[in-house]
Amino acid sequence: MHVNHNLISLKCVLFLFFGAIGSLFPFLPIHMDSIGLSKDESILISAVAPIVALLGPLVAAPLADRLAGGVGGAKRSKNGRYLRVMIAVCMVLGTIMYWLLLAIPPIIRSPPNVAFICDENGGFILQDRCGAEKTCYNWGSSKGSVLVSDCIFTCNASSSYAGAVTPIYTDEEPLYNVDSVDYLDENAPLEPEFPAPTSEAAKFIPHPHMCFKNSSGGIVCEVYTEFSKPIDFRIGLYPNINDENDTESTCKYPFANEFTCRLPPDVRKNLTNDGQDDCHPLVLCKIENPYENRDSLLKRSQCGYDNISYWLYLFIRCIADIFPAAACTLLATAVVIATRETSTGRGDVGKQFAAGALGLAIFAPIIGGAANGRMLEAMICFTVLMAVAVVILLVDGSMPLSPPEWWWHTRCGLLALPMSSVRKYGLEIGALGVALFLLGVFWNAIDTFLPWHIVDIDKVKAEHMASGNASNVHLVIGLSITAGALPAVLFLIAAEKIVDYCGHSNLLIFCFINYIYHHLGRYLLMPCRKCCADIKNRI
């Protein structure tokens, strides 16, 4: 097998660059959680940063074309030094910006106790006051989600309610009267196998009914039972109505929405002991994840809530993502230039990117397993790999990166395909660009949130976090990258033959079908089958 020694250094750069990406990017969502960002804030950062990162290729690509042709009458670069320097600069700036993420102060929040109460007159949120000043939050006009569970009828409303259920009705006598005579005594009278039916009517145990007006003006009632899932109410709140000098140190926020809870007469009678006790019957509910729930209304009312760290993280992350995106585009350009086959008009691009996929597969599980996905160790590995790649780019001048005057040339220098012919395929190039754009959207919609899927969702968190073996979670995150990258290495090595056999259109159709299967698999398949979907997706 013929080996082009001029491409070895380029393969090393690709291996190091994508290895650095694999050592850092899968663990950025975990870092956002570790500094105290809420789920909504982390999701917004993960959505906005890639959009801003598009500025990298949009600026770097035209600039590279301009530098390739010479600026101000300067001679055209013959060894591609302009391209190597641009890639190195993007790597250095990206590394510096990602280090700044470690300088963002963590968000220290002390979530106060909170509870959900309501009666026939409306609903309220009870929340402990914040700080030594015992302040309450001044709500605006915004609405948010409140997830309630463990609803009971009670007299006592406390912000520290944690879901301890107290029965309203108690049976003073057992359902069936058990005779004290030993059932093994042969002389004992025979008892019927089934007890005789009693004339006592079955008791109806009521459940809390919480009614509200929906967006269309209709009244909707939610019923909570012991088998119910948490109920999601979207409400707004008015400012505190308790006295600022309240000794109970509790804020009471009334609902801005029309909201009532039904209290049947039997419940009132039972709670108030036929009116003899001093009791105000109401419905009391526990609020599930009051400050971490998605689109949580109460998130901003936490003691110590400060969004400065959030805005800093969003700004730095958006700027930082620009440079790897630009470097990736320029590296792809370098691969196309360096591997153009001068005799047939074909390039061996796949084998070069196979080195990058190999780096991605190796370093992600190393950081996940050996460093437990910690940001400091990930950044050290990222920096070392990027630094070595920068040195290779600046030192090695033998990379075949000289820009061609025409797109393809023959070995003897004769023209194979002039640029005027390439321009005829503008529509085809545009259609291919749209297809690749959609594939990128589908890919990013899964891989960006994959770490949260592994750590936070359903059984994965219960299996790893509840057992105290938290390090395995980060290892699984790294292995999920490896599971897709390793098969991609084999695919990229044989990419030219596979394209010849299957055709470009069939491969693109297969990619879209695979993404349909992959997205459905996130909802329908078992975790082990999702791993198979990950492998196919990477390919």
Image (cartoon, rainbow, N blue to C red):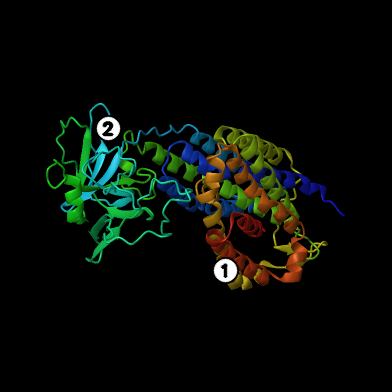
Q: Residue at x 30, y 54 (%)?
A: 233
* Residue 225 higher or lower than 359, as above or below: below
Give the SS element for disc 2: loop
Q: How many discs mark residues in the rendered view?
A: 2
| Rendering coords of residue 511 (x, y %) | 62, 65
> Residue 450: in sight, yes or no?
yes
Q: Is residue 136 left or right of residue 195?
A: left
Amino acid residing under circle 1: Gly
| Rendering coords of residue 194 (x, y %) | 41, 60
| Badge number at residue 430 | 1
* Residue 190 higher or lower than 388, as above or below: below
Camera-nearest residue between 329 and 310: 310
Amino acid residing under circle 2: Cys
Q: Is residue 335 left or right of residue 145?
A: right
| Rendering coords of residue 218 (x, y %) | 23, 66
Furthest residue in direction top, as rendered: 132
> Residue 238: in sight, yes or no?
no
Assess disc 2: are there few (<14), some (14-19) or many (≥20) residues with their C-alpha within 10 Å of its C-alpha.
many
Q: Is residue 490 left or right of residue 439?
A: right
The residue pinned by badge 2 equals: 130
Give the SS element for disc 1: helix
| Rendering coords of residue 2 (x, y %) | 86, 54
Camera-nearest residue between 487 and 248: 248
Furthest residue in direction right, as rendered: 1
Q: Quadrant of the N terminus?
A: bottom right
Q: Quadrant of residue 531?
A: bottom right
Q: Quadrant of residue 248?
A: top left
